Image (cartoon, rainbow, N blue to C red):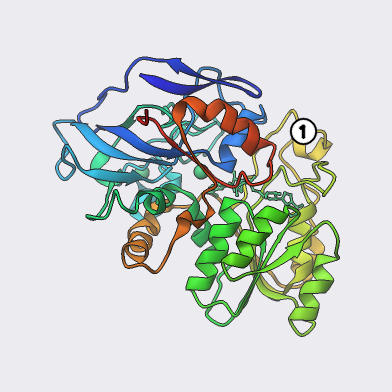
């Protein structure tokens, strides 16, 4: 089959690789009809993780079931399913509690002591191949497949966002403990930040501020009902305080991660975390879904090399703030978010800028990685002509 393979920093290509196959009788094989490129793929693409050469990338996957292991009960050939980017077993102590981003069965304990969590095509998240390919092996298929309703094909571009960014945007608002009527400050107008804005709107936020320095992405934030704030011109914290009776936003969402940078493009790994502490009110909560990693040898910043940032902990403590972090437990949300899409209450596909065949994925990586104007979210169709 054809798949997008990582060969080193900024080197990916479409290669012929062995077909995905059933390895355990609890697996199914999916023929991918849509698979996305994610901001998380870019950390690997840029060589800023220890993902191994030869890895097939892609963790935002939707497709049709074409082969079913003998021990699978509820998933049948021909069903259209969307897969959480996390791979869970369903029976470990974490999956049991809905923390499927931290599965103890599927994770790779050699990554670091106490490691939990697995994903398709991802650095440090187990040996699983990604779905930027024609076919994908899905472990523990009964648990991981979300079966789509009869409008699966008609709304495929919305449903594919259930694999990651819509639940992840939602997760940031839940970690931030957003309540109806509250204001939220979202840092980052990439796909995740935009999905956080959509989620905040659905949950009844009174004010949604989205900060970025990319004008095209801020325009989308505005379309989603948020107040766009350009981080390159203004003092964001002062602006936020002016709009919130001097107090600061009720809560905040970090949707950028360790590669956050100033408007000149220089990475300053602590700038957004500290900006949130500054602009969120005393007692407010921060939801941090942007990725931070335990070591980053290629970083310029000496602390970041060790996976650390100079965090304004004094201000954070003094303001009595709280914080939630980490991978989104997609299964905790995806069924209900699917119902929002099905009943016309959510349209996450609004952020898609490019719909391409898999053969054009290497070119798409280049543009998306440059954050070229208008390249907000790329979806790929592996079986398109
Ligand atoms: N926790 C999870 O489960 C999970 C899931 C998916 C993605 N992620 C992570 O979320 C983050 C965002 O993903 P994405 O797909 O939206 O990525 P993205 O890179 O497309 O978007 C990031 C945005 O942040 C902006 N930005 C960078 N520095 C900034 C600054 N200092 N101030 C304001 N804006 C700034 C960029 O211009 C860009 O628009 C990534 O780190 C990704 O790995 C986490
Ligand atoms: Zn993703
Ligand atoms: Zn598990």
Give x and y (percent) for residue 54: 51, 17
The residue lying at 59 percent from left, 42 percent from top is: 39
Residue shown at 63% from the left, 54% from the top? 255
The image shows a total of numbered marks equal to 1
Task: Tell me which corner region of the image, top left, top right, bottom left or bottom right, holds residue 363.
Answer: top right
- Residue 90, given in percent of the width and then of the height, sits at 30, 46
Q: Is residue 75 left or right of residue 154?
A: left
| Quadrant of the rendering where the N terminus is positioned | top left
Where is residue 379 drawn, in percent x and y?
47, 41
Q: Position of residue 93 (x, y in %)?
A: 36, 49
Q: Residue at x 56, y 73 (%)?
A: 178
Residue 158 visible (yes or no): yes
Crowding at dot 1, Cα within 10 Å, few <14 / some 14-19 / many 20+, comes out as some
Camera-nearest residue between 353 and 73: 353
Above/below status of 273 relative to 61:
below
Is residue 110 shown to the viewer in this render? no
Q: Quadrant of residue 298?
A: top right
Please say if 197 is above or below 249.
above
Whether ligand 1 has any atom under 8 Å from the Cβ at mark 1 is answered as no
Q: Residue at x 54, y 41 (%)?
A: 38
Question: Extreme bottom residue here?
Answer: 245
Residue that label 1 marks: 299
Instruction: Label 1, secondary structure: give it.
Output: loop
Quarter the C terminus occupies = top left
193 to the left or right of 88: right
Give the side of residue 44 with respect to residue 110, left or right: right
């Amino acid at each position: 089959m054809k798949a997008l393979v990582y060969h080193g920093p900024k080197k990916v290509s479409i290669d012929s690789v062995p077909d995905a196959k059933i390895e355990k009788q609890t697996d199914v094989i999916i023929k991918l009809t849509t698979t996305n490129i994610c901001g998380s793929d870019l950390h690997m693409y840029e060589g800023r993780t220890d993902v191994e050469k030869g890895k097939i990338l892609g963790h935002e996957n939707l497709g049709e079931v074409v082969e079913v292991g003998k021990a699978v009960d509820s998933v049948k050939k021909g069903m259209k399913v969307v897969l959480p980017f996390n791979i869970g077993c369903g029976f470990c102590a974490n999956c049991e509690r809905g923390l499927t981003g931290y599965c103890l069965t599927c994770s790779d304990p050699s990554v670091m002591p106490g490691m939990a969590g697995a994903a398709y095509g991802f650095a440090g998240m187990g040996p699983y191949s990604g779905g930027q390919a024609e076919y994908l092996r899905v472990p523990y298929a009964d648990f991981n497949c979300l079966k789509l309703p009869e409008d699966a094909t008609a709304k495929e571009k919305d449903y594919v966002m259930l694999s990651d960014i819509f639940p992840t945007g939602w997760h940031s608002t839940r970690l931030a403990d957003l309540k109806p009527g509250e204001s939220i400050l979202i840092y980052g107008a990439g796909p995740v930040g935009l999905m956080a804005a959509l989620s905040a709107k659905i949950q009844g936020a009174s004010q949604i501020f989205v900060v970025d320095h990319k004008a095209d992405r801020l325009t989308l934030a505005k379309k989603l009902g948020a107040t766009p704030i350009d981080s390159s011109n203004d003092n964001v914290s002062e602006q936020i305080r002016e709009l919130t009776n001097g107090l600061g936003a009720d809560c905040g969402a970090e949707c950028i991660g360790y590669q956050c940078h100033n408007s000149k493009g220089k990475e300053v790994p602590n700038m957004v975390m500290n900006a949130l502490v500054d602009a969120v009110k005393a007692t407010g909560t921060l939801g941090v879904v942007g990725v931070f990693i335990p070591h980053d040898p290629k970083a310029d910043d000496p602390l970041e090399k060790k996976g650390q940032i100079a965090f304004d902990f004094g201000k954070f403590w003094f303001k009595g703030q709280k914080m939630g972090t980490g991978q989104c437990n997609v299964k905790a949300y995806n069924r209900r978010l699917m119902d929002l899409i099905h009943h016309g209450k959510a349209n996450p596909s609004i952020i898609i800028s490019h719909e391409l065949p898999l053969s054009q994925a290497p070119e798409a990586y280049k543009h998306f990685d440059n954050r070229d104007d208008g390249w907000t979210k790329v979806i790929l169709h592996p079986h398109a002509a």
